[in-house]
Structures are given as C-alpha cells and as structure tokens.
C-alpha cells in the first residue's frame, strides 16, 4: 500500500528531482498513513534517499538498462507497483518521466496528472492542483482511478529533509525483448552545461541583444550563477541560438527559482512559458516592455552596460560569500 | 504509408484565459481557436511524407462540431481526410481510447500527435494511444525519417538529444524541430476550396472510462509591482536577490 516514487539517476547519481519527488511522496504517504518505497535504476548509493524520507528502496541493477528506455522503465515501475500494491505513484517532470508516465498509466489502468504543483488538496476524493493553459491558470483535478500517477512539476515542492533509515532490496524485474523494441542508437548531451529542465537559475536572452555574437555576456552571466542559458522564440527562429534553448509556450517550460530575462520584451507566449519560475528579473532599455509587469525586479537600462556590471558584482558577491 | 495526425483544437497562443460557470468551464468568448502548435509541426512533417514518399494523411480530432473549422484548416493545408469523434475532450485517457480505436480500424502505420496541447498540457495522449494499440512510441520528437517499415527518430532529452530506431507502427509526440517555424503552411485559396470537398467523417465515441476529471479552474493571484533598480546601482540587485528573494 506504500506510495511508490520513481527516483531518477544519471550516471549512477540521483538527480535533484529524485530527492524532490521523494520529499513530496513522504508527505503524501503521511496523509495516507503509509510509507514510501522508491524504485531506482543503477544508482550507486541508494542510501541517499533515506535523507528525504524514503523507507524502502527497490534497487534495480541491470546493464541492459544503462540507457533510458521508456517502455522498459515503465515495465519495471509497473512490476514494482504491483509488488508493493502501490495506489499512488509519484514521478518528476523530466523528459524521461513524461515519456514513460502515459505508458505506465495504460498498463496500470491508472489516471495520470502531470504538472502537479502542490500536495493533494484532498485524499477522498483524490484531488490535486496542477497548471494548465501553459501556466496561465491552474486546475483542480480529481483522479478517480484506483491507482494514481502524479507528475510533480520541477522545483514546485522543493527538497524537504526527513532523515530516517531505508532498507534496500535488490529488485529484479522480468524484462522481455518487447521492452526494447525502440532501440537507442546514440545520445548527444552536453555534459558540462546545466540543462533548462534541471536548472535552478535560468538566464535568457532576447532580440534586444541584436545578434548571436553578443551572447558571450549571457553565457558568462550564466556561468557565474551556475545557470542554464535560454532564449526567446524570435531568437531561435532567426537561428541565433538552438531550438533547444527556446523557452515559452511552444518551446520549453521553465520552472526555475530565478529567471533573468535580458533584452526580452515579454510576449504573452513567452511569459506563459516562464511563469512558473519563482523570481523573475528583467533587464531591458524599454520601460514599456510587457515583461516589467510580470517581473519581481527590473532594471531599465542598456543590457550592454548593465550585464557586465552585474557579472562583476556577482563575482564580488561570490568571493565575499565563498 | 498511412499517417494519422491527431489535432487538438486550442485557443490561440495570444488568448486571454478566463473561466465561466463558477470557474468550471473555459470562457470561449472572443477566443480564436487554432490547430495546437505542437500538432501543426507534426502535420507539416506529414505533408512532407505525402509529397516525398507518397503517404496518405488523415487528421482526427475528438470534439464537438465547433472544432470542424480547425479540421477544415488541416484539410486546406493538405490532409486527405478528416475524422471527428463526436465527444467532449475533457480527459486524456478517454481521448486516447477514442483515438486508439480509430488507429486500429484505419490500420495506420504512423500516428503523429503533439507532445501536449497548449490548453490542458496533459502530455499523455500520444503515449497512451501507443500503449493501447501496442505500437512503438517516441515522445518529444524533433526529427523523423522513414525507410520501408523502419523509422529513425530523434528525441529531445533534458540537455541534449537522442536518436533511436523503431519499427512501424509508431506513435510520436511531436514538437517544434519536426519542421521549422518557417516551414509551417498558411492555406492558400486553392487549398481552402479543395478542403470544402474533402471528406469530414463524424463518428460517435466508444464507451470508455475517464482517468481524471477537472473539478475547477483557478487564475493565478495577481502579482505585486516590480521593484525597479537604478542601472547605476546594479549591486542593489545582487543584494536583493540574496537577502530578500533568497535565490542566490
């Protein structure tokens, strides 16, 4: 009956999102009067999960699963859910979790709610709050199926330590060739860059930067902050930056703790996509730019003068607070 | 090759979002509806398969008769046939079951749907359709080539991309990257005239259970005023982010 949580790892290390979903699962389990079981795949140190309230870890160790494969991973979680008789399953909003969740929902005949931003409002009937209309609204959704899958928005709940002890069991699911019919050929991932999905801080540039040659200061600012870089739609459409950096309604959603927009006017579609970020800063020379209505902090000024000064001040700040 | 493109009928990206009936329904007053952008990238890629590889392209929507202009637009862009399943699309699982039936009955090789609709953002329909018909599935798809019965598919992952190979039948959850923004087509007069004569078949839904139900909607609480900082005093921003916002 425990709450099952899928804790993602990469290269054997748990992602921050894994600890966040575990923290969330712990509080859901408390509401339901039960415990938390985590399922991990090829993680090196499963005991780390105990810090965030996990009571039991089902640890899968299998070389065939070294690359993520949605069908196989959905199958594993299904088998774990059945063994644990889990009625609530919690996953993150990573690309991989969003890939496997609908497959899992069908095999378990479970209702799936994505983009959940808070603890359940109610457990009977089971209702949760999620974002809709690309962050322009919320809805309260009731999940009526016996088994429920909750996809938690990144950075929506945060990390909550709940130290205890977790037992670790080796879990050896049965896998068949049918789980591997989508064959992964290659993965092309920048290892030294923070991805927008994982980032706590995102630095974004818009058309106001005038050309791709001016992105050096954006990258430097991101570097100082340990942030990911992003851009507005026109910038990606003009080919100044890759599509993977386009954030907004038709690009990637951003739910960072801090979002810094530089030379971005703030079209409604852009604001929708980044609205889930907690603190927004805008730097723009046009005081009429719509972004100023959405931002928490703003500087009306020339980005080419303000950003280098900001980088300098942040470096000083880092030195003083090291 | 038979392709089915699933089309959501959604408010235009510039729409003001309001609710009626005690916040239980989306207020369609004054709202312009369009093909869901993620679906439109897929539809445009399907047109490429039609023109270069002789594929046939059907479009399908789950919705009331109000969605028909959106299906007609897809026909004007170049789809051959349209199907409307006459039911309200209020739950992803329910919609997926309706679509799965159409895919099975029509014997489609490739099903293209957007990775999510920009209204409900459920992000579940393509994967559920694939699981229901036991077809292969690739989500957040930004590239697809097909040779014979095999597809090479590129998927966007967090911080990069991944290439995989899968046999047809295949379902993809598509997005920008399948084609570029500049490849999107605006229907011309000839396309619009031809679309009027193309078949738009209305079928009744099958019995299916729902996974979820929207109880009500809420608008975000209005934000406070922006705190403006003097461009000559950038250090103040660093201090506020550290001491007040506590994000650095």
Image (cartoon, coloured by chain):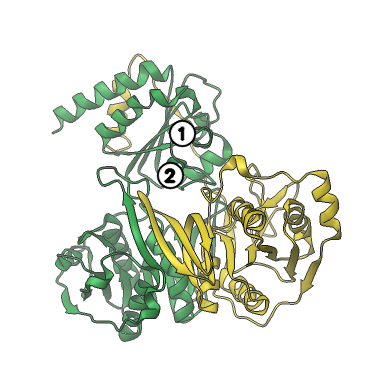
Chain colours: A green, B yellow
Of all residues shown, which one is farthest toward the top?
Answer: B232
At label 2, counting other C-alpha atoms closer than 10 Å, the crowd grade (few under 14, some 14-19, many 20 or more) is many
**Which numbered circle lies on residue A244?**
2
How many marks the image carries: the answer is: 2
Q: Position of residue A7 (x, y in %)?
A: 28, 66
Q: Quadrant of the N terminus of chain A?
A: bottom left
Task: Report the mark closest to the observer, 1 or 2.
Answer: 2
According to the image, label 1 marks what residue?
Answer: A295
Residue A123 appears in view: no
- Quarter where residue B89 is shown: bottom right
Residue B215 appears in view: yes
Subunit bearing disc 2: A
Between A26 and A42, the one nearer to me in the picture = A42
Q: Could you tell me how far apart the alpha carbons at marks 1 and 2 are, in whole angstroms?
A: 24 Å
Subunit bearing disc 1: A
Q: Position of residue B147 (x, y in %)?
A: 52, 63
Q: Earlier in the sequence, mark 1 or mark 2?
A: 2
Residue positioned 32% across, 31% down in the render: A219
């Amino acid at each position: 009956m425990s709450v099952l949580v899928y804790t993602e790892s990469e290269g054997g290390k748990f992602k921050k999102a894994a600890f966040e979903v575990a923290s969330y699962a712990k509080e859901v389990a408390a509401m339901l009067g039960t415990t938390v079981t985590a399922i991990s795949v090829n993680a090196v140190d499963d005991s780390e999960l105990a810090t965030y309230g996990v009571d039991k870890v089902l640890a899968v160790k299998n070389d065939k699963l070294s690359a993520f494969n949605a069908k196989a991973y959905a199958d594993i979680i299904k088998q774990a859910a059945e063994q644990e008789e889990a009625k609530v399953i919690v996953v993150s909003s990573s690309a991989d979790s969003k890939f496997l969740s609908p497959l899992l929902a069908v095999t378990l005949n479970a209702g799936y709610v994505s983009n959940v931003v808070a603890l359940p409002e109610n457990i009977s009937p089971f209702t949760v709050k999620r974002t809709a209309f690309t962050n322009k609204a919320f809805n309260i959704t009731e999940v009526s199926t016996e088994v429920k899958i909750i996809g938690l928005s990144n950075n929506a709940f945060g990390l909550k330590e709940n130290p205890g002890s977790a037992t670790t069991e080796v879990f050896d699911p049965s896998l068949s060739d049918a789980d591997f019919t989508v064959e992964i050929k290659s993965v092309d991932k920048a290892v030294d860059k923070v991805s927008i999905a994982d980032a706590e801080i995102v630095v974004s540039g818009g058309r106001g930067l005038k050309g791709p040659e001016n992105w050096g200061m954006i990258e430097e600012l991101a570097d100082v902050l340990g942030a990911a870089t992003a851009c507005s739609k026109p910038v990606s459409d003009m080919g100044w930056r890759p599509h993977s950096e386009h954030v907004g309604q038709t690009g990637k959603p951003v739910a960072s703790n801090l979002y810094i927009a530089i030379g971005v006017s703030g079209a409604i579609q852009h604001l929708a996509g980044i609205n889930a970020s907690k603190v927004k800063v805008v730097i723009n020379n046009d005081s009429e730019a719509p972004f100023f209505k959405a931002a928490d902090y703003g500087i009306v000024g020339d980005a080419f003068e303000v950003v280098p000064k900001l980088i300098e001040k942040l470096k000083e700040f880092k030195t003083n607070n090291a | 090759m038979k392709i089915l493109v699933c089309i959501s009928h959604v408010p235009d990206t510039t729409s003001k979002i309001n609710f009626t009936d005690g916040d239980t329904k989306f207020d369609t007053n004054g709202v312009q509806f369009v093909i869901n952008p993620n679906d439109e990238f897929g539809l445009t890629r399907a047109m490429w398969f039609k023109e270069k590889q002789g594929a046939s392209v059907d479009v399908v929507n789950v919705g009331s008769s109000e969605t028909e202009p959106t299906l007609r637009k897809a026909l004007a862009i170049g789809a051959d046939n349209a199907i409307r399943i006459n039911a309200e699309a209020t739950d992803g699982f329910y919609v997926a079951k309706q679509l799965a039936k159409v895919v099975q009955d029509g014997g489609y090789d490739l099903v293209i749907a957007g990775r999510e609709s920009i209204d409900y953002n459920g992000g579940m329909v393509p994967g559920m359709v694939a699981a229901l018909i036991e077809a292969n599935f690739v989500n957040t798809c930004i590239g697809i080539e097909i040779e014979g019965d095999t597809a090479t598919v590129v998927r966007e992952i967090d911080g990069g991309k991944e290439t995989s190979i899968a046999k047809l039948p295949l379902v993809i959850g598509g997005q920008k990257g399948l084609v570029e923004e500049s490849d999107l087509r605006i229907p011309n007069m000839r396309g619009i005239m031809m679309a009027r004569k193309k078949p738009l078949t209305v079928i009744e839904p099958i019995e299916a259970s729902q996974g979820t139900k929207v109880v009500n909607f809420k608008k975000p609480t209005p934000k406070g005023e922006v705190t403006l900082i003097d461009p000559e005093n950038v250090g103040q921003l660093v201090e506020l982010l550290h001491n007040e916002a506590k994000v650095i």
